[in-house]
Image: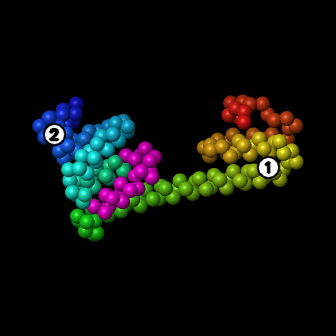
């Protein structure tokens, strides 16, 4: 692979801590990311970032470039909390170098705004799930006088499960179980015993 050979040559000639090696690592990481080899890409971006932190000024534009790409990878992998400080630092570096009205700063602001929207969306979804589970349990409580059934379904609904499992599997099973004298036998949809 040409990018790997380029990195090897730069490391041999310039030394492994040279900023040009960081650029080769960035290029190689981008290739791995494009191929959806995210673990390899993450490792390479992190190595490039370490080299640039040691070799360049803390407000160098190349540092912002690597920060942005590593943040994008973290976001793609669902590591949103790790992406936030990287996007923030990249924005700070770009503002310092280019001024607040530069297109590069605008792009960094959009990246950060999108990330914050995704974090808020996740928080809202989790809160909605909690309220839905609480409402399901409230309805179960109002429709039965048999505490053993409530305890069993309370345990099932309080376990973290995807929304579609709760809505399509757990809730119908819970309401169906209220009309039987004994709990339903475990099946593939019951997820085993409590």
Label drawn at residue 15? 2
The answer to whether residue 17 is visible is: yes
Q: Residue furthest front?
A: 54
> Of 20 and 126, which appears nearest the observer?
20
Task: Pick the quarter of the image with the C terminus.
Answer: top right
Identify the residue at image location x=22%, y=33%.
4
> Of 78 and 57, which appears nearest the observer?
57
Residue 20 spot, x, y in % from top left: 17, 45
> Of 185 and 43, which appears nearest the observer?
43
Of pointers 2 and 1, the one earlier in the residue sequence: 2
Looking at the image, do the residues carrying marks 2 and 1 touch, with CB atoms under 8 Å apart?
Answer: no
What type of secondary structure mainly makes up the magenta span? helix
Q: Say which residue label 1 marks.
A: 140
> Residue 83 magenta-drawn?
yes
Residue 146 spot, x, y in % from top left: 86, 44
Identify the residue at image location x=45%, y=52%.
81
Q: Which stretch is magenta?
A: 73-93
Residue 140 spot, x, y in % from top left: 79, 49
The CA distance from mark 2 to mark 1 is: 67 Å
Identify the residue at image location x=64%, y=41%.
165
Q: Residues within 10 Å of mark 2 (few under 14, many from 20)?
A: few
- Report whether 77 appears left or right of 15: right
Q: Residues within 10 Å of mark 1 (few under 14, many from 20)?
A: some
Tag 2's secondary structure?
loop
- Report whether 13 appears left or right of 126: left
């Amino acid at each position: 692979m040409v990018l790997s050979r380029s990195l090897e040559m730069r490391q041999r000639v310039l030394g492994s801590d040279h900023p040009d090696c960081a650029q080769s690592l960035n290029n190689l990481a981008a290739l791995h990311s494009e191929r959806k080899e995210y673990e390899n890409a993450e490792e390479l971006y992190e190595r490039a970032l370490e080299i640039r932190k040691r070799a360049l000024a803390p407000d160098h534009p190349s540092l912002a470039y690597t920060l942005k790409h590593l943040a994008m990878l973290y976001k793609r992998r669902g590591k949103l909390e790790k992406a936030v400080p990287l996007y923030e630092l990249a924005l700070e570096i770009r503002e310092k170098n280019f001024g607040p009205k530069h297109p590069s700063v605008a792009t960094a602001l959009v990246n950060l705004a999108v990330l914050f929207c995704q974090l808020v969306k996740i928080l809202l979804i989790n809160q909605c799930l909690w309220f839905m589970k609480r409402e399901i349990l409230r309805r179960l409580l109002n429709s039965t006088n048999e505490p053993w059934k409530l305890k069993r379904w309370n345990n099932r609904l309080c376990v973290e499960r995807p929304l579609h499992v709760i809505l399509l599997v757990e809730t119908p099973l819970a309401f169906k179980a209220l009309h039987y004298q004994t709990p339903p036998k475990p099946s593939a949809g019951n997820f085993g015993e409590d």
